[in-house]
Image (cartoon, grey):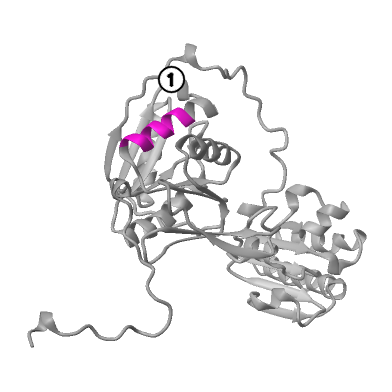
Amino acid sequence: MSESAKPAPPAASGRASTKKELPEHFKAYKHVWVAVEIEHGHAHSVSFELLGEGRKLADRRGVELGAVVMGDDRSSLDAAAAQAFEYGADVVYLVCHPTLAHYRNEVATRVMTDLVNTYQPEILLLGATNLGRDLAGSVATTLLTGLTADCTELEIDEEGSLAATRPTFGGSLLCTIFTLNFRPQMATVRPRVLAMPEPIAARTGRIVEHAVNLDENDIVTKVLQFIADRDSDKAQLPYADIVVAGGLGLRSAENFSLVRELADVLGGEYGGSRPLVQKGWITADRQIGQTGKTIRPRLYIAAGISGAIQHRVGVEGADMIVAINSDPNAPIFEFAHLGIVADAITLLPALTEAFSKRLRVNRLAS
């Protein structure tokens, strides 16, 4: 019997393969794109985090990684393009036009949808910042495609589709969402959820300059004045190297001062879980978790926090998580690097004193 005429082997047990051929018109969509967010001449760091993740997705698909850079100042755009190449982009789609001097949804949506319709990427990623969320929703609606917001993980499944994972049901569950019937597949990711990749100095790629037909007289929205954020002195939790946070295990607002004292000694930021914001113990800018700030510090100390999934997704990128909880079965011990079963109200002052003494000794020694 010839090789080609041999009977097929019996099917393997278990679930049958569900792999399907992509629709013919989908085959025109290729490559992974990242929208580089530029405001006042500087690229937002989340764009570089997305480029690092986009590089992995593009390699998995065997396609190019593209970056979209738009604005009105050519020198700023060239600088952003150079950074995009260093963080993994193969090609930069550059749009320079006077109407892009400030972010306006109407203009940015026109440009992005024109780019997508012209070059047809299969995946488009944006940062879940104020601007990124505004643009992503508008672009997805205009293109009549799907958008998965505030993702915590991105992957390519065995059939080549984007698997976008995000918390759902108030943060109590994680679900993975696929956009199977539309292109491009879109997702947003918050700053500090993804690791910052290492840039490769002097890495280059090609630039595609895309011309757009925009007239300021046709644009309804006008920028009259830019006013600096009066809350710019708020907590910068996402970028702190050391964060100390408290939860309901502290039992009272007065006891939260123990968290602040330890953070002060360590030279770090302080925050807390969502119930503390709801009770008025801390302000919303210091809430840590899926509905608050996502952090990636070198050291995270969680005192009296149970560690529900909505908190976990906001902190699990930390290099070292130290959990203090009187309940040995608290969920936080499942993902903490170091767990201490103790009453946080008793242990926090002891830690503050110990660190204070150690730092004094180190200062004297130096």
Q: Is residue 197 left or right of 271 when viewed as pictured?
A: left
Which quadrant of the figure has residue 19?
bottom left
> Is 114 in the magenta?
yes
Q: Is residue 239 above or below residue 209?
A: below
13, 304: nearer the viewer? 13
Task: Tell which residue pokes out farthest to the left in this image.
Answer: 2
Query: Left or right: where does residue 239 sit relative to residue 76?
Result: right
Q: Is residue 337 visible?
A: yes
In the rendering, at what x and y percent does residue 258 appear? Answer: 84, 64
x, y percent for residue 158: 37, 67
The verdict on residue 41 being magenta is no
116 vs 265, left or right, is left
Which of 92 and 25 lies nearest the eye of the viewer? 25
Which residues make up the magenta segment? Answer: 109-118
Callout 1: few (<14), some (14-19), or many (20+) C-alpha neighbours within 10 Å? few
The N terminus lies in quadrant: bottom left
Q: Position of residue 91 (x, y in %)?
A: 30, 44
Give me the residue at 83% from left, 73% from top.
344
Return the residue nearer the eye: 294 or 10. Answer: 10
| Quadrant housing residue 71 | top left
Residue shown at the point (63%, 53%) measured from the top left? 238
Q: Which residue is mark 1?
A: 98
Mark 1: secondary structure: helix
| Magenta residues, dominant SS class | helix
* Name of the residue lying farthest toward the bottom: 1
Quadrant in which the C terminus appears: bottom right
